[in-house]
Image (cartoon, helix red, strand yellow):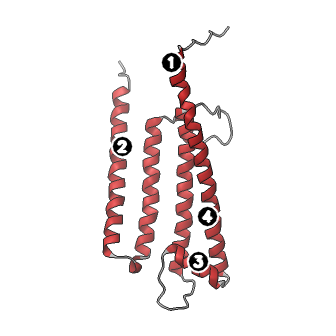
Amino acid sequence: MTAPKPRLNPMASIMFGSRWLQLPLYLGLIAAQAVYVFQFWTELVHLVEAAFGNKEALDLLIHSVGYKADTDVPKLNETIIMLAVLGLIDVVMISNLLIMVIVGGYETFVSRLHLEGHPDQPEWLDHVNASVLKVKLATAIIGISSIHLLKTFINVQNLTEQTLMWQTLIHLAFLVSALAIAATDRLLSHHHTPKQH
């Protein structure tokens, strides 16, 4: 026989039940994920059409990647393709970040998903908690920032020195923040680990 579940007093029930107020937030993030999927396919279609010589698609692609051509009639070149592909990778990485927040956040702060034994269960979900989620998010943000910085360096001739300096400094700030979060998490986990005799 299983032990009966302890009953919470009314105030505790209200406070504990308030976690469900986060559900609309996670549903909103799922909607944002759908917008990113649409954006990805729009950019990909423009890239494919530009590769087949569609001038209008090429103009849209050049405008979206922030490339400035030397001629009035630009052609699809390696730099434009690279910037477009990095833009697609950027969308995928942000989408991965959204999945981490949606699945990990819901599992940690709202309710269990009961995915044990499911063949598609993410490996990291086995040991997810607020600290692990924080470190994973910080790492994902550094990856996204790295893609943005790479796009900046590829398109360097079309940007000012001030823009380059600020983007590099912001990336370094993300890097230092992630290292600080990881170091703090490591210290706290060592602090809470019971000593072996």
Asked if the residues shown at circle 3 and circle 1 are in contact, with their CB atoms under 8 angstroms apart, the answer is no
Residue at the disc numbered 1: 11
Chain-order first, disc 3 or disc 1: 1
Which of these two is toward me, 178 or 29?
Answer: 29
Q: CA distance from mark 4 to mark 2?
A: 31 Å
Residue 77, by quadrant, is: bottom right
Residue at the disc numbered 4: 40
Residue at screen point 48% across, 75% down = 66
**Badge number at residue 60:** 3
Q: Label 1 amino acid? A: Met
Residue at screen point 53% across, 67% down = 87
Chain-order first, disc 4 or disc 3: 4
Q: CA distance from mark 4 to mark 1?
A: 46 Å
Q: Is residue 123 visible?
A: no
Q: CA distance from mark 3 to mark 2?
A: 40 Å
Q: Classify 44 as above or below 55.
A: above
Chain-order first, disc 3 or disc 2: 3
Asked if the residues shown at circle 2 and circle 1 are in contact, with their CB atoms under 8 angstroms apart, the answer is no
Residue at the disc numbered 2: 181
Q: Classify 42 as above or below 80.
A: above
